[in-house]
Image (cartoon, rainbow, N blue to C red):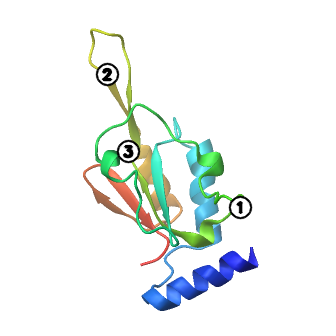
C-alpha cells in the first residue's frame, strides 16, 4: 500500500491535481450504493495510473447490467480500498431490463434516489446525459 500511496502522490504532484474526495466519502458512496439504492447502479472507474478508461465510450448508452459496488475500488495487486487512487467514477443509475424477444427492454431508473444519496452525503458530482461523474482528483 505504501508503494500505491507514493505512486498516487507522484502523479498528483506531476499533474497538478487537487483531491476532491477522501476515503470516508468514497466509503459512504460505496456503502450507500449497496445498501440504500434499489439496485447497485452500473459504473466505470478510472484510476490515476490508467492512461484511459476503455469502457467509457460504451457507457454513454444504457446498459443491460447493474454494478458490483462491493469491490468498486479494487486494484489488482492492491486489493480493496484503493480509493486513494480513483481519478473519477462515472455512474449511470439506470439499466435496461430484458422483457423477452419481442418486447423492448424496460428502463429501470433510480436517478432520484442516486441524487438524493449524493446530496445526503455531500458528494460533489457533475451530470451529463444521465451519467454522473464523481471526481477523486481534478
Q: Residues within 10 Å of mark 1 (few under 14, many from 20)?
A: few
Give above or below for 85 relative to 97. Answer: below
Secondary structure beneath label 2: loop
Location of residue 92 in the rendering, given as x and y in whole percent from the top left corner = 39, 46
Secondary structure beneath label 3: helix
CA distance for labels 2 and 3? 18 Å
Q: At x 52% / y 72%, what residue is drawn?
A: 49
Residue annotated with mark 1: 77
Give above or below for 107 relative to 89. Answer: above
Residue 100 location, quadrant: top left
Residue annotated with mark 3: 111
Q: In which quadrant will I find the N terminus?
A: bottom right
- Who comes first in sequence, dot 2 or dot 1? 1
Location of residue 137 in the rendering, given as x and y in whole percent from the top left corner = 47, 76
Left or right: residue 78 compared with residue 111: right
Q: At x 48% / y 90%, what residue is drawn?
A: 14
Amino acid at each position: 500500500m505504501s508503494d500505491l500511496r507514493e505512486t498516487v502522490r507522484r502523479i498528483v504532484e506531476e499533474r497538478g491535481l487537487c483531491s476532491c474526495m477522501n476515503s470516508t466519502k468514497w466509503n459512504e458512496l460505496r456503502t450507500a450504493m449497496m445498501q440504500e439504492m434499489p439496485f447497485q447502479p452500473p459504473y466505470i472507474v478510472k484510476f490515476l495510473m490508467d492512461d484511459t478508461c476503455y469502457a467509457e465510450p460504451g457507457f454513454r448508452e444504457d446498459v443491460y447490467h447493474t454494478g458490483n459496488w462491493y469491490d468498486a475500488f479494487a486494484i489488482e495487486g492492491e486489493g480493496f480500498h484503493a480509493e486513494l487512487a480513483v481519478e473519477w467514477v462515472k455512474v449511470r443509475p439506470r439499466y435496461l431490463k430484458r422483457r423477452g424477444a419481442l418486447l423492448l427492454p424496460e428502463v429501470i431508473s433510480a436517478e432520484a434516489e442516486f441524487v438524493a444519496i449524493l446530496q445526503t452525503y455531500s458528494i460533489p458530482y457533475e451530470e451529463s446525459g444521465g451519467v454522473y461523474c464523481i471526481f477523486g482528483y481534478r
